[in-house]
């Protein structure tokens, strides 16, 4: 059943519970957006005309006392001002655009929903303001159009129900009653915030069903705006909110229903079992800058969601950080989030430079590079199978290409055309084979394979027995992806073993690893500040342990001029070159002296 037209605004698509790697907007995006909005408002705002007759201004004055009425009705249009049952809140002498205890009023009430409201009905809040002593009722003989204004806002919103779950038990066991209930109930906030849905292709199975939700908080803000706007040049971000009086041409104060901090998990589902609902009301002023900032952030969230660069539910998580986080910790988080972006770029840049200039694989684990590409490919195929946004797919695809390019720098890639189908063959480089690096790498990967095989097999069997999947292909991908996500840190262990056997760390890309280690420290901070899955939080601290071992190896293995650096040269090479140059200089000097003597 389709919902009423006003209710579909802000509706979010249901999402599944399967965990997947995510990427999104982040705190850095908010900072960039705010800075862009500030300069855009300064440089691109329309110029005020010089003629006062071409300007429109606010009909109300600052600190002017206002009376307020708030009615609740199931009809979108309201004119029953004499109904005492509809009037739920009335305030007098509220000063306009004045900050203080007398300008902010609150009220809490209990509302008993009707039967129609329990069955996807609608409810609207009609708020009216007027000069103190005047009536908002147009039928009142003392009514003055320029002295009263109002606005209507829905108290009930509509969100889509979850589709029938296409996932099934691959072993043929019938789902129990609890699973059937989960498949048919309305998707709640916890499900939406986890990740993208596995049932993206189920959207074409039929019309979307909707469920109604109650908004427990209604915040009414009067925007403190006394700007004189040109009649034909109002800024496009303000024009839709201006309520202009047709007689005078001036505008009424802007009424803003502030739902910026109303998170989706605070909404209350409406059904037959609900008998009483709580409604918290608040009225107060809001500055022009703060109001525009809220509008710009919400608009930016919508744009990023439409382009696929922001996941559903991520906006609420960012708002939750500001609501529940410590102010000092938030300030530090916003600063280090910028540093995180810088370190990511520097780590990426130095990683490319290292492999581009690297001439020797001595001391480096070539098999780890191949395994890293396999892990990146698994993640890409998993995202592709789950209908992920194109931006996340593009990022993962570029990562696959870079990892494959690194294989070409670490090993020789040849095309075998002896068979019917050309096949790629990987051959070890001479610098990798002629020393102990390949031997140690084979030993490390041998024991690592045993550990990973047991972990992957155990987790896959558990997932097959106790979880549901769309197909066998989906089960294989989800099992491999979950293992990569949980046990990915083990892939760095072969390099630790090679360092231990060679007693050297000079072959490692330390610049890139330093930036990655700094980013890991920042991730530790985010793990405490931002809500995230427990598994992801644990993986952050596991990476810390690996990097600490790397630092310990760098400390215990002293500098040795025989070790090869990141460009494939050792310290002895420089010494030999210097000795050769000195010998040539001595020979030249001796030859010149002999010529002079003769």
Image (cartoon, helix red, strand yellow):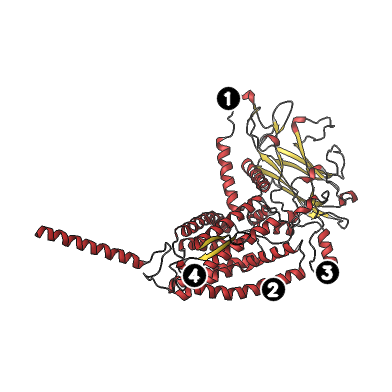
- Which residue is tagged 3? 173
Residue 289 badge? none
Residue 550 badge? 4
- Which residue is tagged 2? 458
Name which of mark 4 and mark 2 comes first in the sequence: 2
Name which of mark 4 and mark 3 comes first in the sequence: 3
117 vs 165: above or below: above
The answer for how far apart the CA atoms under marks 2 and 3 are is 20 Å
In the shown orientation, is residue 178 left or right of residue 306? right
Residue 503: x percent and y percent? Answer: 44, 74
Question: Within 10 Å of the Cα at label 1, are there few (<14), some (14-19), or many (20+) other Cα atoms?
Answer: few
Q: Which of the image's four quarters has the C terminus?
A: bottom left
In the shown orientation, is residue 543 left or right of residue 115? left
Nearer to us in this view, 428 or 351: 428
Name which of mark 3 and mark 1 comes first in the sequence: 1
- Which residue is tagged 1? 50
């Amino acid at each position: 059943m389709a919902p009423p037209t006003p209710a579909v605004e802000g509706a979010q698509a249901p999402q599944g519970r399967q965990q997947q790697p995510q990427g999104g907007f982040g705190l850095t995006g908010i900072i960039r957006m705010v800075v862009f909005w500030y300069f855009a408002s300064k440089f691109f705002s329309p110029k005020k005309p010089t003629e006062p007759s071409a300007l429109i201004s606010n009909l109300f004055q600052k600190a002017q006392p206002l009376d307020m009425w708030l009615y609740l009705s199931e009809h979108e249009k309201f004119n029953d001002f004499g109904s005492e049952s509809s009037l739920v809140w009335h305030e007098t002498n509220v000063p306009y655009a004045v900050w203080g205890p007398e300008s902010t009023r609150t009220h809490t009430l209990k509302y008993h929903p009707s039967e129609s409201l329990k069955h996807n009905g609608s409810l609207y809040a009609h708020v009216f303001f007027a000069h103190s002593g005047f009536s908002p009722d147009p039928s009142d003989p003392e009514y003055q159009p320029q002295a009263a204004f109002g606005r209507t806002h829905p108290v009930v919103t509509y969100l889509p129900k979850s589709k029938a779950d296409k996932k099934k038990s691959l072993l043929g066991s019938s789902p129990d009653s609890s699973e059937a209930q989960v498949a048919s109930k309305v998707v709640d906030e916890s499900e939406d915030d986890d990740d993208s849905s596995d049932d993206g292709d189920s959207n074409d199975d039929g019309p979307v069903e909707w469920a109604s939700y109650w908004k427990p908080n209604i915040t009414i803000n009067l925007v403190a705006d006394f700007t004189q706007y040109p009649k034909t040049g109002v800024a496009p971000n303000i024009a839709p909110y201006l309520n202009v009086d047709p007689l005078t041409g001036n505008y009424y104060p802007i009424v803003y229903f502030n739902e910026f901090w109303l998170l989706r998990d605070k909404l209350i589902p409406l059904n037959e079992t609900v008998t009483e609902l709580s409604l918290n009301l608040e009225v107060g002023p809001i500055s022009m800058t703060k109001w525009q900032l809220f509008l710009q952030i919400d608009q930016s969230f919508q744009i990023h969601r439409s382009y696929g660069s922001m996941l559903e539910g991520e906006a609420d998580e960012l708002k939750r950080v500001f609501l529940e986080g410590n102010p000092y910790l938030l300030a530090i988080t916003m600063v280090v989030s910028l540093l995180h972006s810088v370190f990511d770029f520097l780590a990426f840049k130095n990683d490319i430079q290292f492999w581009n200039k690297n001439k020797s694989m001595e001391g480096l684990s070539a098999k780890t590079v191949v395994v890293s590409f396999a892990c990146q490919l698994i993640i890409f195929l998993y995202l592709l199978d789950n209908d992920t946004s194109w931006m996340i797919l593009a990022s993962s695809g570029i990562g696959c290409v870079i990892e494959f390019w690194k294989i070409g720098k670490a090993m020789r890639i040849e095309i075998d055309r002896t068979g019917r189908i050309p096949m790629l063959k990987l051959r070890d480089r001479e610098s990798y084979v002629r020393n102990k690096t390949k031997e140690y790498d084979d030993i490390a990967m041998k024991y690592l394979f045993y550990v990973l095989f047991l972990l992957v097999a155990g987790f896959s069997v558990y997932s097959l027995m106790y979880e549901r999947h769309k197909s066998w292909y989906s089960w294989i991908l989800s099992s491999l992806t979950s293992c990569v996500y949980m046990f990915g840190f083990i892939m760095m262990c072969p390099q630790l073993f090679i360092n231990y056997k060679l007693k050297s760390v000079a072959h490692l890309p330390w610049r890139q690893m330093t930036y990655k280690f700094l980013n890991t420290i920042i991730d530790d901070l985010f793990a405490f500040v931002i809500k995230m899955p427990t598994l992801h939080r644990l993986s952050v601290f596991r990476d810390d342990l690996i990097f600490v071992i790397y630092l310990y190896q760098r400390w215990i293995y002293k500098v040795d001029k025989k070790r090869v650096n990141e460009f494939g040269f050792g310290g002895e090479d420089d010494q030999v070159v210097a000795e050769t140059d000195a010998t040539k200089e001595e020979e030249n000097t001796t030859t010149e002296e002999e010529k002079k003597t003769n």
